[in-house]
Image (spheres, rainbow, N blue to C red):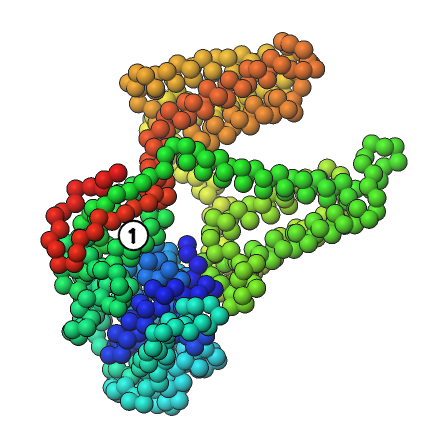
Amino acid sequence: MSSTVGGSASSTAVRRLRRDLENLQHGIPHIAVKPSEENLLEWHFALHTLPEDTPYHLGCYHGKILFPAEYPHAPPAIIMVTPSGRLEIGKRLCLSMTDFHPESWNPAWSVETILVGLLSFFISAENGYGAIKSSDQVRRQMAEASWAVNRRDEEFCSLFPEMLRSSHMQAAAAADLVRPPDPQASSLQIGESDAVPGGATSDTPLLAVSTHLLGVLGPSAREEVSETAGERTVNEEERGVVANTDDDEAGECWICRDSSSNEPLIQPCACQGSMSGVHATCVEEWIRHHRRNAVNDELPRCSVCHQTYEGYQRLPGVGHFLRHMAVDALKQIVRTVVIVVALVCYLISAIPYDPDGSKVKLPMVVRVVLISLFFVASLYKVALIAISVPPHRPPPRSACLRRYFFVSDFKSLVMHWAEVFSSVVILTFWFVMGVLPLVFFLPFPLLALVPSIRMCLGAPSLECLRLALMVTRAMITTPCVALWLLVTRAWRNPRGCLRTARKCLLMMVHPLDAGLHIIVAVVSLVLCLCCSSNVPVLVLWGVHGTLVSVGLLEAVFVKKWRWTNGPLWWLSLQFCALAGYIADSICTFPNGLGDPQEDSVVRWLSVPWVALFAGLTLATNWQFIVGYYRTWQHQHGEFTLATEPAGTSVAPAEGVSV
């Protein structure tokens, strides 16, 4: 997910936003929009005087559009500010035109397309991430209270004072009055200097654009609004912009909307009219951004006519892929080692000194420094998570918080959560075992609760609490309900229940599925922890390793059996690796084969056992691995477009030359 606030707008983003703002002079029914006075990449809008047959008719709903610095190559984020009972506030909305789905973004979509699509979704009954289920009565109450909420919003009062100054706004909406736009429109000057950090000037003259789009239009039927939204969306997809008949705009690029560039326009696809000309650099930049979020390895194609582009691409090879995976694994290992070392140093510093010499003695200064560093690091980690939650929230306005204490990527945020959780689990284990004193243990579970409390206090807190209670109730009652259903079904149809149980058992012990191998790994763990002799686990590993070898040969060379692939294989591989690690490093076998002090037999047999099963896991999931590799190649490849002058007929592309 691209960052939407904090970076300086690129020159392409400035030109495109300036043109989108110019096209909004004609106004959009039911929508008022203005850019922020402080940040060009942040636009504000207000949905008002919505159709009478909706519960939002008397309301006014403030929201934000956060554009990335790479716009229009990357999609914006949409965040609602005013409660409506329809959409959550303070969270990014999951729509096909937002940064939730960058793979479906179309650079031809303008700000008007985005807002009309949002309005159509707002008054519809569609569900999605960020949508709230509320009754019409609750939504009407929120609509009536929305004006009071907006009056307390400093940004709304600053950007839309005309809507608040009109004391008859709600009365006019209720009486179905129509007011034309205010002729005394305020203007906003946007220049290329906005794209340069530090406010550097540019030779391009500033463009004064009227931005007063606050005419209160009369309510229309839902069908009319939906039809208008659909027509606008189709037209935007086909033409890329609102129709423009000026002669000097006929030769502009449909991505950056720049008609003064020295770069020639080309026609790389079958698009005609205003969509026929585009800069090669704009297309290549769009392909580069689109491929970063690709979910498959399809060839680059036009986002409007869907014709495949002709060009040349350079894809990284297997060596680059293995290097990339090794670097990622190394980073994760380093993070894990740092956490383990920090925990061990904290434990050594926290435990009291033992005069008999069984524990490490550290000087008091070193102990204080280590404890202080661990506590400061824990505070930073908790603060980072607390500021970054709930997920998909807008970044903080403070540049310091946004740079050092905010994580927008969901995967990175989950990793921070996992590190905090695992650290608390280890500290809890030490405390339960009596190694870590209470005074050094208690602060960290309390700190770990801060992000959870922060999420519960976030809007809408009651909805989150209700969902949490429902999930908790389901977790408690599900086993009882499942047992009751099983007993009643067995009582009514014992033969059918036996057939179902037999099928489930066959699936669990089927040698071509991962279930049997998980059972073997779990049994190996039990034998390692409970048996004083290594003979049982060695016999189990020998038999299972022989069967795995036969299966590996069949999966690689014969390919006649129907192996079942899926994530359970990777889970079983982790169980096998865990069993081998515990047998080698933790367990001791005073009886059995080999020297009890070295356990060389267990070590030499566990390594090939895990290696053979890893090979079988790779063989059964090879198609998935190849697909992942191809997708990674396209995400990190370079594409060069085959240029054709604008207006030249281009034959349909059959593929991409390498």
Residue for point 45% across, 75% down: 38
Q: Position of residue 13 (x, y in %)?
A: 35, 65
Residues packed near mark 1 inside 10 Å, few (<14), some (14 to 19) or many (20 plus): some
At mark 1, the secondary structure is helix
Q: Nearer the viewer, residue 593 or 36?
A: 36
- Say which quarter of the image contains residue 35: bottom left
Residue 408 coordinates in the image, percent (x, y): 48, 56
The kind of residue on which mark 1 rests is: Glu
- 197 left or right of 581 in image: left
Q: Quadrant of residue 42?
A: bottom left
Q: Can see residue 421? A: yes
Instruction: Please tell me in which quadrant of the rendered image residue 425 appears.
Output: top right
Residue found at x 30% / y 16%: 558
Position of the C terminus by quadrant: top left
In the foreground, 32 or 246: 246
Q: Residue at x 55, y 45 (%)?
A: 418
Quadrant where the N terminus sits is bottom left
- The reply, left or right, for residue 211 in relation to residue 602 is left
| Label 1 sits on residue | 284
